[in-house]
Image (cartoon, grey):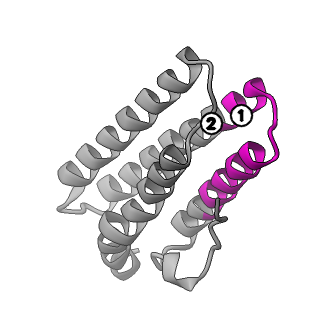
Amino acid sequence: MKELIWDKSLSVEVDEIDEDHRRLVELFNILNRALEEGEPRDYIAAVLEELIACTVWHFRHEERLMLKYRYDGLAEHKEEHDALIESARELQQKFLQEDRSLSAGEIEFLEHWLTGHIFGADMKMGAYLSEVM
């Protein structure tokens, strides 16, 4: 499994959001390494929970900024946030209920979940916020 590398291509040009994204990339990589190294299920479950909890916090952080600076795309962006969290929680429940590890496909899903949102909705939002902040 590959590690995500933070680089300028992931920057949305808003420092506080970029800091959040760096932390999420770091947690994804911790989860990835834990799986590769065969860490105990309890540890993997804890890292997955931390990744989801930090993502929830980060999404609320973005939503607060979008509210403050009156971002027109807030409703659609929040819908995407809600759908992403729901899908991550479903993956988490599946992991917790079944006696198996996360599959390569599930890790790939999490990677696309994280980077896809940054490259899509967050870049658009970041362009707006970097002009008005």
Q: Nearer the viewer, residue 46 or 81?
A: 46
Badge 2 amino acid: Leu
SS type, badge 1: helix
Residue 110 in percent (x, y) is at 49, 50
Residue 119 in percent (x, y) is at 38, 71
Residue under label 1, please give it.
44
Q: Nearer the viewer, residue 14 or 105?
A: 105
Name the image quarter holding the N terminus. Answer: bottom right
Q: Is residue 114 magenta?
A: no
Q: Is residue 28 magenta?
A: yes
User: What residue appears at the point 56 percent right and 84 percent down from the top-left corner?
Assistant: 8
User: What residue appears at the point 34 percent right and 79 percent down from the top-left corner?
Assistant: 127
Q: Which residues are magenta?
A: 22-47
Residue under label 2, please give it.
48
Q: Nearer the viewer, residue 38 or 46?
A: 38
Q: How many marks?
A: 2
User: Is the residue under label 2 in contact with that under label 1 (CB below 8 Å)?
Assistant: yes
SS type, badge 2: helix
Badge 1 amino acid: Ile
Magenta stretch prevailing secondary structure: helix
